[in-house]
Image (cartoon, rainbow, N blue to C red):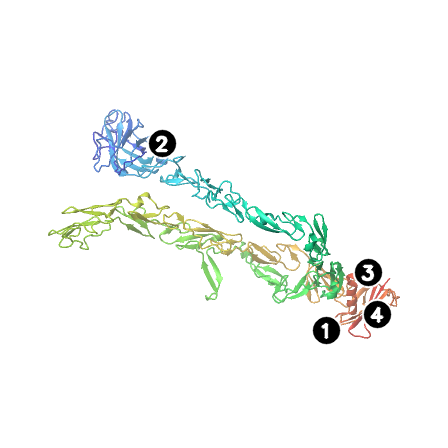
Amino acid sequence: MLGEDDTSAVNGSFYEISTFFLMLVSQSSGYFELQLIAVQNANGELSDGDCCDGERNTQDLRCSSDECDTYFRVCLKEYQTDVTTTGLCIYGSGSTNVIGGNSFQFKSAKNNQNRNNDGGKIVIPFQFAWPVSYTLIVEAWDWDNGTHSSSGKYSRINPGDDRQTIQYNGLTANFEYSIRVRCDENYYGSKCNKLCRPRNDWHGHYVCDQFGNRGCMEGWMGTYCTTAICKQGCNLLQGVCSAPGECTCTYGWQGPFCDNCLPYPGCVHGTCVKPWQCTCEKNWGGLLCEKDLNYCGTNKPCKNGGTCMNTEPDEYNCACPDGYSGKNCEIAEHACVSNPCANGGTCHEVPSGFECHCPAGWAGPTCAKDTDECASNPCAQGGTCIDMENGFECLCLPQWAGKTCQIDVNECMGKPCLNAYSCKNLIGGYHCACFRGWAGQNCDISQNSCASGPCRNGGRCHTLLDSFMCECPHGYTGTTCEVQSNPCSPNPCQNQAQCHSLMDDFYCFKLKPSLVVPSVLIPVIDSCTVAVATNGTQEGVWHISSNVCGPHGRCISQPAGNFTCSCEPGFTGTYCHENINDCVPPPCKNGGTCIDGISSFKCFCPDGWEDVNECSRNPCKNGGRCVNLLNHFYCQCQDNWKGKTCHSRESQCDSSTCSNGGTCFDHGDTFRCTCLSGWVGSTCNTAKNSTCDSNPCENGGTCVGGGDAYTCICKDGWEGPTCAHNANDCNPQPCYNGGVCVDGVNWFRCECAPGFAGPDCRINIDECQSSPCAYGSTCVDEINSFLCVCPLGRAGPHCQEWIGKACRYSGLQFPHGSRWEEECNTCQCVNGIVRCSKRGGAGPDSSAPCPRGQECVEHQFLTCFAKPCHQWGVCSTPDPPPPLHTQCEPNSGYLDNSCARITLIFNRDKVPQGTTVENICSELRYLPIAQTLAKDCTLLILCDLSYSNSDAVEVAMVSA
C-alpha cells in the first residue's frame, strides 16, 4: 500500500532495511525489537499507484472511497551487500495485525522510546550469538490487496537499551520506526552469548555484574566462588571450613584457631608441639609425666628445720636436727638443744616441740620476723611512718612536729607573710592579714589593676577600688584608650551630609538639602578581587584575583557578592570547567578515533589509514617491485629471489616475515603466516579484535588501542586508567577563612563560614556598613559581628542606653558609678556629681553640704608624717568634741591592764608622700584583730609623733 519500490523492491510497493553483523556460535539468548513510530500515506495509494480501496476521484484524482488496511511484516536475515527480498529469513521474521489506515502514529513510542508500547511492536527472538551485522527487510501491506511496499537496509547494532531510529521516505508513503537488540535475562556481552546466572548453592555463591562477570558473595572465593573463607586467624594447615567464618580442627588439633595440639591421652604434667606428644615439665617424669622428680621441692615434707633429700621419683629422706626424729622430723626429743630461737628469743620445750618467747620488736615461731610497728598507723596529721628495728619514725608534714606528728608548728616563726600587717598561727597552718592591694596565702599577689598595663596608646592608668581608669591622651578614647576619638571617622552622616566633630560628639550638615536625593549607600564588594597591602607597587596595594573560574575563565564581579565567569574560547559551563567537545559530530573517517582538544581535535587512525605509502622506504630488494597495500606491501620478486622482501635464495621465511609472533610456512613460490589469537592479515599485522570494543573508558573518556592493550584519554575532571575517578579540585584547599570546599567535576564551590563572602571566602563582610552604632559611637568590624565603642554615659550593644554623665575630679575623668579613695575619704561619681564621705573645705567642690546639724571643719588631729601633706576636712557638730578622760596616751609612759603602748619605727624613704599620722592610725583601726576586739568592748586607738624618734609613731590602745 505504501510508497514505491526501491532497487530491491519486488512485486509491488515495499521498503526494506538490511544490516550486517558477525556471529559467534554459542549458548545465547535475546531478541530483536522493531517499534513503529509513524506512518503517512496521505492519498491512500499502493506502491503501483492504485488506490487501496475504490477508484480515484475524477476531479482531484484522490483516493477518497476508503482508507487502506495497513499491517507490517519484518524479515531479519544474514548480512547482504546487495539486499534481496527473496529467500529465507535466517534470523527470524514477524508481523503485526492491521494497526491503522492511511496515516497514524504511536505517540508514546515517539516521545519516549524506552517505554513499552505493544502497538506497532514486532519482536523476533533468537537463540544464537547475535551477529552484530544483519539485513532487515520491512514490508507494509494492505489487507485487501496482494501488493506491498518494502524497504531493505543492512547495518550494525549492538545489544543495549538505546534504540536506532530509521526514517523511510517513498514516493507515495513515508514511515518511521526504531530498532534495538536486547539480551535475555542472565545473558550478556555484545553477542548475548555470555551466560551468568546468579546462584547461592553447592555449585557456587556469586552474583553477576553489568558485563556478566561473576562476583563472589561475602565470605566466598575461587573461580566459581565455591571455596569458603575461614575464620580470620584460623590455621589453614590444621583447620578447615565448609561455610564462611568457620574453623573446624583436623584430628589431633584443638582451640578456636586450631593452633593447639592434643597431648597423649592421660598426660598429667606434660605438653606437646605435635599431636599425641607428652613432653614432661620440669621436675616431672614417667611415661605420662605423672612422677614427681623433686618431691622435696614440691611438698616440703620435712618439719622443724629438717633437710629434705630426693631419693627417687616420689620418694625422699629427711635429715633431722638435734632433738628431732621421725619420717618428717615431726617427733621432738630435746627441741631447745639446737637453739632455734633467733634475735635473743628464749626457748621453752613443750610436748609438741618448743616455743620461743621473743623480745620486743620480734615475732614468729623462731623470733625471726621483725614486728611492723607501723601497722597501727601511729603517725597523725598525714605523717609517713618508717618501720625500724624495735621501733618506728614519723616523717611529718611541715606544719606538724613531734614523735607522732601531733604538735602544731608555729609557721609564723619563719615569717612567711610578705606584705601583711601580721601573721597568725593556726592549727595546722597560718593566716596573713594582707595590706590593702595584696592577696594570696603569703600576701605576695598584687591586686593593682594597673600592674598589667591595660591602657593603650600612651594612656595613664589609675587604680580604683575594684577596677581601673585610663587617662587617655588627646585624640584617643575608650576604656583602654583603644579608639581614636574622631567621631566623624568613619562618616556617620547619611544622604551625603557633612560631619563636624565636637567635644566627644558630632553633628551633620547639608548645604543644599533640596538637591540631595535620599538613598542608602551600600558599598559594592568586589567578589573577584581582594586588595592586600604591599611595598612592591607604587600604589602600595596588590590585587589578588579569585581562582574560582579555574585556569580557563576570568571572574567578573557582580553586586551583592555575586560573580560570573567569562570563559576562554573552547570552554563553557558555570565555572568554565567544560571543554567544548570538538568531536561532535565525529570528524574522523574510516573508523578513526577522535581525541578532543581545545578548539581542536586529533584523529587516531586505524592501521593502513594514515595516508602512509608502505613502499616509500623501498622495502623490496634485488630488483623486486613493491605494491602498496592497506597497512602492508607486497614484493614481486625477480630472478628466483624469495622472501617477503626478495632477500633470500633459499627460503620464503625468516624471523621478520610474520609479525606479532606469527609462524611462517614456506610454500615454494610464496609463504603463509599462521597468526596468534587476536591478529590477522597476510603477515599478522592487523589486530583482529580491538580492546576498545567493550567500551572500558568511563565518564566520556576516549579509548585508543589495538590488540591486547588500550589507553583511556579522560575528559577534564576525570582521571585513572578507565577515567573512573573524579579529580579532586579541592586539593590544594582553595577556600579561605574556614570555608568548606565542595568538589564537582572539573569545578569547585566554596561554602563560606558566617561573616565571609566571595567565591573563595576571602572577603570579610563589613557588619558596620549599616551604621548600627548610635549617638556618635564608633563601630569596630569583627568576624560575623561588630562592636560599638560607646562615648561616656552610653552603653548597650548599639550604645542606645543612657547610663549617666561622667565626672571630672582633680584633672581626671571618672565614669558614672565609679568609686575611688581620696586619702581617708571615699568618693563616688553619680551622674556628673562627685560625692565624697567626710569631705572638708580643703578639697575641690568645698561647698558640698554636710548632713543636717553638722558643719565642715578642719581635721583637729592631722599631723603630717611624710611631707607634703594636704589639708583635709570632716563634717562635725558645731559643739566641741567631749574631752578624753584617760591617762593612756601616746608618749605618756603610762601602762595598766587596760592600756597598751606600741612604738612603730618606719623607713621614711619607703613611706608614700602625703602620709599623715592619722592615716597610719586609721589603718590600725582597720586591722581584723582591731575589728574583732571592738565587737566585745570599746577600743580606743590614739597615735602621735614620737618625741624621741622622728621616724617613729607612738600608739596607745585603751579598752573599756
On residue 117, the disc is: 2
Where is residue 7 drawn, in percent x and y?
Answer: 20, 35
Q: Is residue 30 above or below residue 552?
A: above
| Residue type beneath disc 1 | Asp
**Between residues 255 and 856, which one lies in front from this camera angle?**
255
Considering the numbered disc 1 on the image, is that residue within a helix, a strand or a loop? helix
| Residue type beneath disc 4 | Pro
* Horizontal side, residue 240 vs residue 662: left or right: right
Residue at numbered disc 4: 890
Q: Circle 4: is it few (<14), some (14-19), or many (20+) Cα within 10 Å?
A: many
| Residue type beneath disc 2 | Asn
Q: CA distance from mark 2 to mark 3?
A: 111 Å
Q: Looking at the rendering, which quadrant does residue 209 occupy?
A: top left
Q: Are marks 2 and 3 in contact (CB under 8 Å)?
A: no
The numbered mark, 1 or 3, whose residue comes first in the sequence reads: 1
The numbered mark, 4 or 3, whose residue comes first in the sequence reads: 4
**Between residues 745 and 791, which one lies in front from this camera angle?**
745
Considering the numbered disc 4 on the image, is that residue within a helix, a strand or a loop? loop
Residue at numbered disc 3: 933
Residue at numbered disc 1: 909
Where is residue 770 drawn, in percent x and y?
Answer: 56, 54
Q: Circle 2: is it few (<14), some (14-19), or many (20+) Cα within 10 Å?
A: some
Q: Nearer the viewer, mark 4 or mark 2?
A: 4
